[in-house]
């Protein structure tokens, strides 16, 4: 039996179809859902924070987590069916932005990001002490959380999201313009691998290719 509601199934189905790598990473699916609902709240639409609970790695929609981990095949099927049915309207730009953010940050970075939200921090002591399934309350989503989400909105404009391609190497996420990504050679990939191994880089890493074919790290 699937417990996730139609909204969460539809959003999960969107990620399954449009960003499969992130869908196949349990934590990233959860962060995608949280970001989408947070953007919805900040921009004046009714969010769905139902069944949101606090875990050590951040907020988790427990109904989705249970379905995803215990009934994965059935959840995949239900998510796809819900998405293709169109019964729940999805804001495409919001979904794209939420997916992009989870695609350019590591799991640890995403956990740190959501740990900074009062939505989670307000229950931090209980969560970190080992209390199981601490309910999180939308009323704890405060002005600080709103400012964080607005900052993310400014950092990742939709024009960037739709014109970018992400190359991941060893938990480093290199962001190219789609036109530049088509020019990448084996030598470029060797250079990126070397950077990922030897440099202290902060995700996401924005990269351009100049007229001479050299990689320019922003």
Image (tube, grey):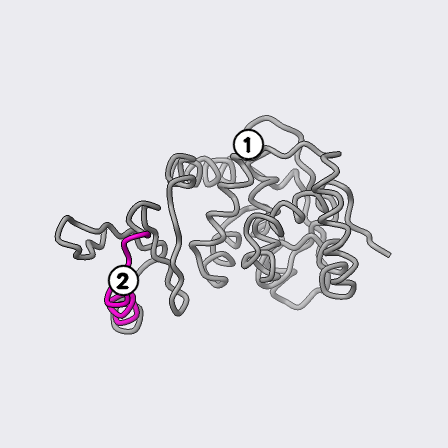
Q: Nearer the viewer, mark 1 or mark 2?
A: 2
Q: Which mark is residue 76?
A: none
Q: Magenta segment range?
A: 182-194
Residue to which mark 2 is pinned: 185
Label 1: state its secondary structure.
Answer: helix
Residue 165 screen position, x and y as percent: 39, 50
Classify residue 166 by image quadrant: bottom left
- Residue shown at 51% from the left, 58% from the top: 111
Q: Is residue 63 magenta?
A: no
Residue at the left extreme of this rendering: 212
Q: What residue is at 75 percent from the left and 34 percent from the top?
A: 87
In the rendered image, residue 167, in percent from the top left (x then y), is placed at 38, 58
Around disc 2, counting alpha carbons within 10 Å, would you say few (fewer than 14), some (14 to 19), or many (20 or more)?
few
How crowded is the residue under tag 1: few (<14 C-alpha within 10 Å), some, or many (20+)?
Answer: some
Q: Quadrant of residue 65?
A: bottom right
Position of the N terminus by quadrant: bottom right
Q: Which residue is mark 1?
A: 42
Magenta span dominant secondary structure? helix
143 shown above or below 15: above
Q: Residue furthest top?
A: 44
3D distance between C-alphas at marks 1 and 2: 41 Å
**Residue lying furthest right:** 1
Identity of the residue drawn at 49% across and 56% down: 110
Of pointers 1 and 2, the one earlier in the residue sequence: 1
Numbered disc 2: secondary structure? loop
Q: How many marks?
A: 2
Between residue 210 and residue 148, name the one nearer to us.
Answer: 210
Q: Is residue 101 above or below residue 191?
A: above
Q: Residue at x 22, y 55 (%)?
A: 217
- Answer with left or right where residue 90 lies relative to residue 160: right
């Amino acid at each position: 039996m699937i417990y996730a509601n139609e909204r969460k199934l539809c959003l999960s189905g969107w990620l399954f179809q449009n960003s499969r790598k992130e869908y196949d990473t349990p934590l990233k699916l959860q962060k995608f859902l949280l970001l989408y609902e947070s953007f919805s709240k900040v921009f004046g639409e009714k969010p769905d924070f139902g069944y949101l609970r606090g875990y050590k790695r951040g907020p988790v929609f427990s109904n989705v987590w249970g379905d995803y981990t215990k009934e994965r095949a059935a959840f995949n099927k239900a998510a796809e069916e819900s998405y293709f049915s169109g019964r729940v309207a999805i804001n495409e730009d919001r979904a794209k932005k939420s997916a992009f953010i989870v695609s350019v940050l590591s799991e640890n970075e995403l956990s740190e990001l959501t740990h900074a939200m009062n939505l989670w921090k307000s229950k931090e002591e209980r969560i970190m002490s080992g209390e199981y399934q601490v309910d999180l309350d939308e009323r704890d989503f405060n002005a600080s959380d709103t400012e964080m989400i607005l900052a993310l909105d400014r950092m990742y404009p939709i024009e960037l999201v739709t014109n970018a391609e992400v190359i991941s190497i060893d938990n480093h996420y290199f962001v190219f313009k789609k036109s530049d990504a088509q020019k990448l050679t084996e030598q470029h990939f060797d250079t990126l691998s070397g950077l990922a191994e030897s440099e202290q880089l902060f995700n996401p890493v924005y990269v351009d290719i100049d007229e001479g074919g050299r990689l320019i790290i922003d």
